[in-house]
Amino acid sequence: MQFNISCLLFIRNHNNKILLLKRRKSPNKGKWSPPGGKLNMEDGESPVECAIRETKEETGMVLEETDLHLFGYVSEKCYENSGHWLMFLFDSKKNIEHLPKKFDEGYFEFFEENAIDELNIPDSDHKLVWPYYFKRNDNFWGLRAKWVNGDPKIKIEAKA
């Protein structure tokens, strides 16, 4: 199976609402996700460089390394039986000023944190991403999940 390395970015506006993308492409087509994308591994891109690049490409927002807080990672084996993923989770310390324009991957909206459970988000995000986003200021988290019959078997690898 293919191994993918990516980053997800959690960006808020001045009202503390979270920016999410309604995806028009796979993976997670038709679902709400934080902005992000795959590392350019052939260029030797780091997760931080990827987070900065993806933020600029998808939202137009310019970030510096000091604007990012890496709060965890999720390693998923056999996600949707299509591949393995290693996702680095970043919180933006800088707020976004306006709703980004629609683009080929989808469109953005802002949401209150308490609305997340009601949104059409990937099942894996309900179990592996959002619970740890809400703990982002407590600890650094590292999770390993192996998907078996559509259910992730989760193990905490790192907690600092």
Image (cartoon, rainbow, N blue to C red):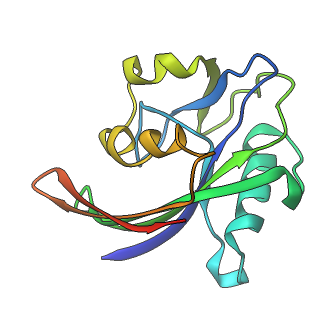
Which corner quadrant holds the N terminus?
bottom left
- Name the spot of residue 70 as percent of width and height, x first: 67, 58
In this picture, residue 155 sits left or right of residue 43: left
Residue occupying the point 17% across, 50% down: 151
- State the count of labels: 0
Rendered-image quadrant of the C terminus: bottom right
- Residue 127 pos. (x, y %): 32, 43
Q: Quadrant of residue 20?
A: top right
Q: Quadrant of residue 17?
A: top right
Vertical comparison of 23 with 17: above or below: below
Q: Position of residue 122 (x, y in %)?
A: 36, 38
Tell me: residue 18, above or below residue 143.
above
Q: Residue at x 41, y 30 (%)?
A: 30
Q: Report whether 52 appears left or right of 160.
A: right
Q: Please state which of residues 85 and 92 is positioned toward the viewer in this rendering.
A: 92
Q: Residue 71: x and y, percent?
A: 61, 55
Left or right: 92, with 156 as reference point: right
| Foreground of the two, 7 or 137 | 137
Q: Nearer the viewer, residue 48 or 102?
A: 48
Residue placed most toward the observer, 133 or 107: 133
Residue under the point 85% across and 50% down: 67
